[in-house]
Amino acid sequence: HDRSRPSLHPLILLISLQSYYNPFIIMSEDEGDDTKYIKLVSAEGLEFFVERSIAMAGSGTIRTTLEGQFKESLEGRISFPQISGYILERVARYLHYKAQHSQSTSRIPEFMIEPEIALELMIAAKYLDC
């Protein structure tokens, strides 16, 4: 276990523009519209729900996958066996951040990245075309 990173609890997380002040909301299995959200699954099996429109606008790789005739498109579930849960969580947060500030005309706040995860996050961002 890497002690330089906080551990993630195996929660299902939902990221939504509607939750500006608290972007991460625990979502029960019976909530939400299946077509509105997609599920991103990390190497450890952690699941992150992201609005489909936010994910498609923020990641070229996710957009291509969901627009194609792939199993992932039909199921609304994309597995990333090479991306750890901690990094995938940061990617999900960035997709939300990017959607919130994409039309901003004022100064955009900095998206904080811890130096110890910067390289791994850059690799994931390049792969996901964020």
Image (spheres, helix red, strand yellow):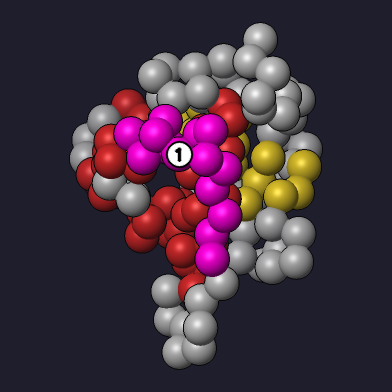
Residues packed near mark 1 inside 10 Å, few (<14), some (14 to 19) or many (20 plus):
few
Position of residue 18 relative to residue 6, above or below, is below
For the N terminus, the quadrant is: top right
- Percent across and percent down for residue 39 are 52, 36
Secondary structure mostly taken by the magenta-highlighted segment of the chain: helix
Identified by mark 1, the residue type is Ala
Q: What residue is shown with label 1?
A: 118
Residue situated in front as seen by the camera: 5 or 24: 5
Residue found at x 32% / y 27%: 71
Magenta segment includes 125: no
Number of numbered discs present? 1
Position of residue 51 relative to residue 118, above or below, is below
Residue situated in front as seen by the camera: 123 or 59: 123
- Percent across and percent down for residue 36 are 52, 53
Residue found at x 52% / y 40%: 115
Left or right: residue 85 versus residue 10 is left
In this view, which residue lies farthest toward the front?
A: 115
**Residue 111: in sight, yes or no?**
yes
What span is in magenta?
110-124
In this view, which residue lies farthest toward the top?
A: 1
Position of residue 37 relative to residue 5, above or below, is below
